[in-house]
Amino acid sequence: MRYIEAAARIKPSRDVVRDQWRVDDVISKVKATAKKANFPQDLAGEVYATLVEGSIQHEFKRWDATRENGKAADN
């Protein structure tokens, strides 16, 4: 969580929180690794997509909170 919160602090714009190219790249690599491990690729992709989306939503919340009223939030 610290990395997500740090990313939220340093990103200059809310528009760069979601990097769809990066999301697609991560999911593609997860599926490739699942295939090599003889694990269901779709299942691995869905699990990681959920994890990544949750992380992005958390980062959006932290990004907004750190800019609320022009000051860093306490929580």
Image (cartoon, rainbow, N blue to C red):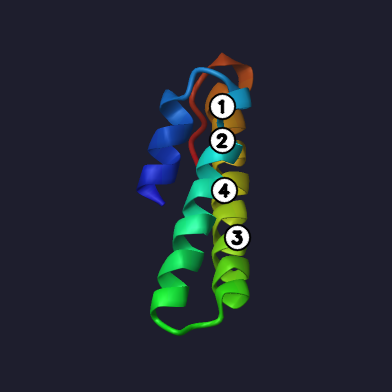
- Disc 2 to disc 1, C-alpha distance: 6 Å
Please state the horizontal and vertical placement of residue 43, each as a whole percent of the image.
Answer: 60, 76
Please state the horizontal and vertical placement of residue 53, each as a whole percent of the image.
Answer: 62, 53
The residue where tag 2 is placed is 19
Q: Residue at x 63, y 46 (%)?
A: 57
- Disc 1 to disc 4, C-alpha distance: 15 Å
* Marking on residue 49: 3
Q: Is 47 left or right of 29, judged from the image as shown?
A: right
- Disc 3 to disc 4, C-alpha distance: 9 Å
Quarter-wise, where is residue 67 in the image? top right
The residue where tag 4 is placed is 24
Q: Residue at x 54, y 73 (%)?
A: 44
Q: Amino acid at mark 2?
A: Asp
Around disc 4, counting alpha carbons within 10 Å, would you say few (fewer than 14), some (14 to 19), or many (20 or more)?
A: few
Q: Residue placed farthest to the bottom in the image?
A: 38
Q: Secondary structure at mark 1?
A: helix
Q: Residue at x 54, y 51 (%)?
A: 55
The residue where tag 1 is placed is 16
Disc on the earlier residue, 2 or 4: 2
How many marks the image carries: the answer is 4
Q: Secondary structure at mark 2?
A: loop
Q: Amino acid at mark 3?
A: Ala
Please state the horizontal and vertical placement of residue 60, each as a whole percent of the image.
Answer: 61, 38
Please state the horizontal and vertical placement of residue 8, each as a whole percent of the image.
Answer: 48, 33
- Disc 3 to disc 2, C-alpha distance: 13 Å
